[in-house]
Amino acid sequence: MMRLPSYRYRAPKTVADAAAWLAESPAETMLLAGGTDLIPNMKRRQQTPSTVIGLRSIPELTAITRGQGLTIGSGVTLTGLVHDARVRAHYVGLWQAVAQIATPHLRNMGTIGGNICLDTRCTYYDQTFEWRKAIDFCMKKDGDTCWVATSSDRCLAVSSTDSAPALIALGATVTLVSAAGTREVALSDLYANDGMHYLTRRRDEILTAVRLPSGNGWRSTYWKLRRRGSFDFPVASVAAAARFDGDHIVDARIVLGAVASRPLEVPAASARLVGQALSNDLITAVADDAYALAKPMDNTDFELVWRKKVVRSLVTSALRELRGDDMREARTKLARHPLIVVS
Amino acid sequence: MASNRPSAHLPIRPTGAAVIGRARRRVDGRAKVTGQTTFADDVMLPRMVHCRLLRSSVPHAKIVKVDISKAQALAGVHLVLTGEQFPTAYGILPVSHDEHALCRDVVRFVGDPVAAVVARDEATAEAAVNLIDVAYEPLRTFASPIDSLTYPEPRIHDYGDVGNVHKAVALQFGEVDDAIAKADHVFDDLFFFEGNTHLPLEQHATVATKDADGKLVVYSSTQTPHYLHRALAKALGIPAAHIRVIATPNGGGFGGKSDPFNHEVVVAYAAMRLDRPVKICLNREEVFYCHRGRHPVLMRFRAGVTNDGKLTGLDLQTLLDGGAYGSYGVASTFYTGALQTVTYDIPTYRFRGCRVFTNKPPCGPKRGHGTPQSRFGQEVQLDKIAERLSIDPADLRLNIVQPPDSLTANFLRVRTIGLSDCIKKVVERSGWRDKYRKLPHGKGVGLACSSYLSGAGLPINWNDLPHSGVQLKLDRSGGVTVFCGATEIGQGSDDVLVGIVAEVLGIDPFDVRAVTGDTDLTPVDLGSYSSRVTLMMGNAAIQAAERARELIADAVSTKLEIPKDRLVFAGRRVCDTEDPNKGCTFQEAVCMAEARFGTLGTTGSYTPPRSAARFKGGGVGPSPTYSYTAAVVEVDVDPDTGWVTVPRVWIAHDIGRALNPTLVRGQVEGGVYMGIGEALMEEQVFRRLPAKLSNALVHKFPSILEYKSPTSLDMPDVITDLIEDPDPAGPFGAKEVGQGPLLPIMPAVANAVYDAVGVRIDSIPVTPEKILRALEAKAAGKPARSGPASFPDILWPETLRVTPPWAGGDGRASNDPDRPTNRNVDAGVEARAAKAAWEKSTS
Amino acid sequence: MTKLRITMAVNGEPADLLVDPDKTLLEVLREDLNLTGTKHGCELGECGACAVLVDGQPLLSCLLVAHECEGRQVTTVEGLVEDGRLHPLQECFADLGGAQCGYCTPGILITAKALLDREPHPSRELIKEALSGNLCRCTGYQQILDAVEEAARRNP
């Protein structure tokens, strides 16, 4: 049986305590929320913190509160989010993204904060110690080389979060708390395109909440590519959100998932869309923008050339759905998922 | 439903059978839904210690030094073992005893076990394993069959045909070159079938201990306790009589637990050394290293075809990537060429197969053993033939189905064959005639067929002993205990055993207790492989139960003065057919028999009929009878991305007779499931790092997450029909169902993709990448196909030439060199049997 | 390493244990409480075999640090039998072929129970979704779905 390495376990009751304890030795401490990312990684010895701070007993992290928009505690489970009527009604793209994460069990455990901070993934990295030893390890853990592209001077592990592209498209910000203070950053700024240093979160900071602006006037959607209808991380995805005035787009954001070490915004697309109605030609042009930007590497399921090609199709589907085309059949086939969940 | 009693509302079959043929709760159903079934890792014994293995981190190297001193010094460590303790080689086939429990001189793949630690708990054992230092001297890495064919040195093993070729075989039945040359059309097609693995949900586990008088006891998740028994005796040098192997119910097998494994030998040795129970449970990654799964196979099919779609001859070549050890590989090689002829009439046939060693986990028998790969090639080629000749693929097949009670070109005896009925059934149920070539672009249907053995006709160790034995114990309690070495791997063998005994004795299955898979307590059954258990154990059980019935009938007849031939056993009573009130309870009847004959016990055994094949290699393929299957698969393909979904599968299976229809349906649908996985997503593939920078050759993703097994959301709806035409060879007419229904799925998917978007995917799995590449090739005016481009030149051995039965052949090769045989049989008897079989088939 | 004390209710019975902080609920159930009905196929959250109910919700015991179950109600397959009677799901799985090798069965039964507790009459689509985190290599799921549907039909 795969077992955990030994560590010291601490369970604070408040964010303040958690931040204080984290500040004691941030480099050797890790935060445990749902455990669906950290625990397998620890069992495979990708991460071996000497102290683990469990966040499960902190009530202030598990609330969803309504203000101008919605403030979601980082400890809210993915299932909790999917069951929230406000998310379902006003942030459809986020709902679609979260409903397709992993499996029902893993959504019952995993949290939104955990999915935002999900470790980047790579088929050279998400392996046991013994396997990684057989390739003499990789840059991200215990080695020097990035085997995905041996000339690369940075780690090319893939951002595999489903929620982050959807949240960025919806303009989310996150709150980071440390013993030294609190700061709020745009979610987009939380990420860096580097497989090892993919978060700009300092190691002494706790992501406590994610804040969404009002969803009024916005339509959003999320299209995910993966092999199976369940379990699998995305190998390419697109989140699209647009605010409409009649047929015309007033504001828009398109964010790609799983084709870089961070969620990848497509700035050219936003510029192209504003002030326009979604014609077929426009959709094609935006899909081409996204295609040009996507840089999938050979470190996930499926072949990278094909994944890049499918980005075009995903963006087309997403924009057609925002336009109001009936995409249900195409979505069901691609997702292999009915987009219904147990209430 | 509190007991296992048959439900009253279920229809009673016209045969009057009370148990057989009725949908029943399986006898072990209650244990499985309460968590009571004790799998190997659930065995917890007092004083038990735990074992972990150190596995090679390099693909091919000499072991220079193994330093275990630090591991031995760790607190809590009881024992550290290396190859030194295991001088004796073992293996499943007598011709390839090439494994040692721990490697001695050479490691042959990443994952090959090098050392073992036994410690107070698993974590300590793991820590100690990491303290063992191994110095390796790298050898050339053989990553593909082409590497192995190109470089004869260094040899991965010092045995085998030549260089790194493990086995090459060449057989010819009739003048195939003439037949193909004279045909109206010649089809020459290349196919590739990627390797894939069993992925049983239960990871292999073993607990070894000493019994009260000091003899070895091994509990293991094995499909083949008898072969493990033999291997342990050999590898440890302990008489088999002093070893007891208990096969715990397997949490899925699919062929992956059919070899004797390193970890089984290691913990057996450790338990004897330490005189305390030792457990090992592999982790998932290690299960991928045990493997013995589907061989990657490259194939070339050259077929001669007449204008009306009849085959004149088939010339088949296969190249198998065997991985690092022999395993069942010699049999696997023959199986890629064995069963083409039992489905369709192929008057002339040549088969050449070659298995090479590579530095990867060994391949072996996965559900369908060696036959799914060439079944895929054959069924896709038939689809191409139908296309070119403008014949409906269903009609093309109906026109060439092998006749019943016939002998094939390669001397396989076909008995009942329900293939035509299967084809007609799926054609009707799927609405094939309204769909094939008539659906809109992007939607398609594909049809394919298959057949499979109901048990291998020859045992692995050639001898004249029965393949399955059953003992029955009856006593004054009225209870019956049935003993058999057969192994429950989820397929329902315990249920078949109990159901048959209950049927023959006219009692309720709940009155029968089964003791199975225990080499001390049960007579030998060869194991749960080759779909042999229902037929072989079933026939043995009938014999044992009928002998018991005979004894009871004698006693009752005398005591109650009822003529014996008027006695009927039914409803827990033994009574007079002419006056059902005259009789007694089953319990009273047993008492009468016990009083008259003394303690009651009967036995039954089963040995398959002799094969008509007398040539070398003819031992692979014969079976008492064959099952048949036809399937229609519907697909939906997105022409923009190649994304493929399978909404529905119609399947009809020639089962002979369904002993318990619930279990039969479960096997059919489970086969479809595994077929869908193989067709669309499952791959056991490897990663070679850039050779300039690294020697590494690793399994690409030895995890359940990245080895893609379909979920409930990926599984199509399955519409199952059973074709029942009882076969005289099977118990109550039953044939196999565990393997055959998997086989048509992969070709049917590929054929359906062609119907949907007009491209041929000649390699498995059928992935969206391949479909899109083929669509792009088609758009560019290139061949609308994705698949292998060439078959390498292989130096085949001299072809053994066997004259087919219809040309006067006697089953021997005209150029077969005399070979030593350990079969203790009178050659004259065998020759006469072959002649009689031939005469029967032609009369 | 200091062992920590946990108190939880397992199948309705109090369990009071001292365990290492690095033990998962799976290990504690199987190795400390001898509840071997809960299975494991990967210990990494990739198969669903180890699912148990924690406060009525199906979670993966292989990813749950035992200490995080302090004060919670844990239900395993051994807890499905009530008053000596099988749960309707158990009856239907046994009768309709929902269990072949039986290794994934405990996790699936537990997950299906949580489903029926929330949605007494789920559609087949919803059953598929609810069970999509439980791999089964034997059945092809059809008879499992049938069994859950039949158990739902027996729901009042």
Image (tube, rainbow, N blue to C red):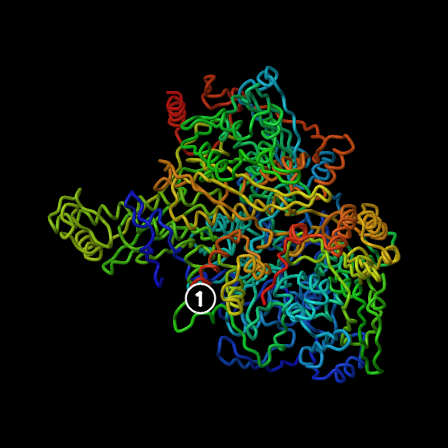
* Percent coordinates x, y for residue C111 in the rendering: 54, 65
Residue at the spot 57% in from the left edge and 33% down from the top edge? B379
* Percent coordinates x, y for residue B322 in the rendering: 63, 41
Judging depth in this view, the residue of B175 and B737 nearest the camera is B737
Q: Residues within 10 Å of mark 1 (few under 14, many from 20)?
A: few
* Percent coordinates x, y for residue B383 in the rendering: 59, 30
The quarter holding residue B639 reads: top right
Residue at the spot 78% in from the left edge and 83% down from the top edge? A20
* Percent coordinates x, y for residue B811 in the rendering: 46, 24
The quarter holding residue C90 reads: bottom left
| Kind of residue at badge 1 | Asn
Protein chain holding label 1: C
Judging depth in this view, the residue of A83 and A250 nearest the camera is A250
Q: Is residue A56 above or below residue A46?
A: below
State the residue position of label 1. Answer: C155
Residue B695 seen: no
Instruction: Tell me the quarter of the image containing the C terminus of chain A.
Output: bottom right
Residue B181 seen: yes
